[in-house]
Amino acid sequence: MRKRWGLLSSIMVVLLLIVVGCSSGGNNSSSEPAEDNGDGGTDSVEEITLRFVHWINEDSGKWEPLISQYEEQNPGVTIESMPLVENMNSQDYYQQLDLMAAAGEYLDIIMFSNLNDYVARINAGLLEPLTPFLDAEGIDINEEYVNSYAEIDGDYYGVPMKQVTNMILMNKNHLDEAGLEIPEQWTWDEYREFAKQLTTDDRHGSYLHIWHDMHSLLKFPGKPEGANRLLKSDGTSNADDPLVRESLELRYALENEDETSVPLSSILSQQMDYRQQFFTEAVSMLPIGSFMLSEWGQFTPEFEIAWAPWPQNGETDKNYTGVGGDALSIAKSSEHKQEAYDFIRWLTTEGIMEQKIWVPSWRNADLTTAVENIASNTSNPEALHIESIVHTLQSSEPIEIYAPASYITEVHTDFATEVERYLLGNQDIDTAIENVQARVQNIVESNQ
């Protein structure tokens, strides 16, 4: 008998059938009155509005001037930017998105932040396949973009926009004080040594957050091929991969043996915020995505920020890392799919460069210009060490991507439970690994 994920999928499908029924009678375009064309005939200009939903508020996204530029270049097309939440929390956004879909509200363009939530909406029937549009334009999406959104049953459903590369955020002032150079390629053993040298009476050298699918699996992004998640591409368990144990032992050593990374007990008891820890200089290094080039929240750094590649598992490895980001999709119910596609292609190429906020996934973008543009839009442009950022982006090799099974979130939840017991000293590594393997296998079997 299927468990709650199967039930959730069924509910989503039913809700989206309601969407199709409710939206089929709606039309989001209108024609202006006929105008004299000068020789007795008339011309009519179709006015259409594309509803674009996302979670980035106006202050952070600077959508209005960008959209005005597109509308000027494309008469008759109006883009309605609709941030569904003000707190810029993407998970809250997905809740609002699902409510809109269930209520049959009209949508054209939908923004996604990660592969898991994207696949869930594909499975629910919310999105239109984009392969026909890409083929008609003659575009190979993997040559045009650094693409972190896998093909699903032979089709692509999203065009990559913002590129988020996993890297190491570093306080360069702390590096200088310790006499350390910005690494251009290094291993996790060297990261551990850096953490020791950067730790003082006033700060920790490293910080790892409660994102156990990332910070408790530090060595997975260094695996260039094959399964690099807790589930393999066919949905079976990958919990017996030796890198699971190695990653957990590394985090445990940093927090509990070396005492150079903030212990999980403090993170949980004090409800620590990773931005606050880094920007108040309480920590020196933070493994995180490149979105932190500009997404500083309420903080303005008064020190120089450097970036290093994701550490490798072996000395002879390349700078392999996980690459994700945002993607734009077309709603299945949209009545203006070609116009939506045209806007998506512009926004993910010229548009994102004009926006000057994020690193583009577009391969034809000049990375140095993109990073300089990002810096110019921050509250302290001098804080970004441009050279190290560009080097890290250019030298990082994306690992293989594949779509996760629908029950990946349940796997991550159970994994986190066992990891925290281990990191808090309530079970040893052998017990933790045994429990993780058993729990993941149980989830897999219950979803077959």
Image (tube, grey):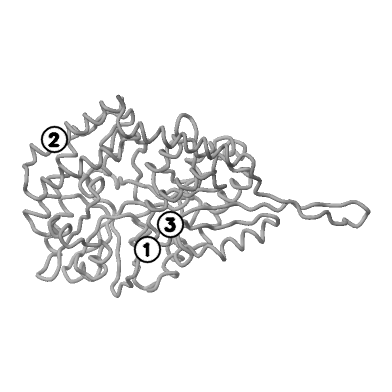
Which residue type carries mark 3? Val
Which residue type carries mark 1? Glu
Residue 234: x percent and y percent?
Answer: 33, 28
Residue 254: x percent and y percent?
Answer: 12, 54
Quadrant where the image shows the N terminus:
top left
Disc 2/disc 1 C-alpha distance (Å): 37 Å
Residue at image point 22% right, 55% down: 209
207 or 333, nearer to the observer = 333
**Tag 1: Cα neighbours inside 10 Å, few (<14), some, or many (≥20)?**
some
Numbered disc 1: secondary structure: loop
Residue 171: x percent and y percent?
Answer: 25, 67
Numbered disc 2: secondary structure: helix
Residue contact between numbered discs 2 and 1, judged by CB atoms under 8 Å: no
**Tag 3: Cα neighbours inside 10 Å, few (<14), some, or many (≥20)?**
many
Choose top left, top right, bottom left or bottom right for residue 386: bottom left
Which mark is in front, 2 or 1? 2
Task: Name the residue that disc number 2 marks.
Answer: 435
Q: What mark, if any, has residue 128 been given in the picture?
A: none
Of mark 1 and mark 3, the one earlier in the sequence is: 1
Residue contact between numbered discs 3 and 2, judged by CB atoms under 8 Å: no
Task: Name the residue that disc number 1 marks.
Answer: 295
* On screen, residue 28 above or below 71: above
Q: Is residue 291 left or right of residue 26?
A: left
390 or 433, nearer to the observer = 433
Tally of numbered tags: 3
**Tag 2: Cα neighbours inside 10 Å, few (<14), some, or many (≥20)?**
some
Task: Name the residue that disc number 3 marks.
Answer: 359
Of mark 3 and mark 2, the one earlier in the sequence is: 3
Which residue type carries mark 2? Asn
Disc 1/disc 3 C-alpha distance (Å): 12 Å
35 or 11, nearer to the observer = 11
Of mark 2 and mark 1, the one earlier in the sequence is: 1
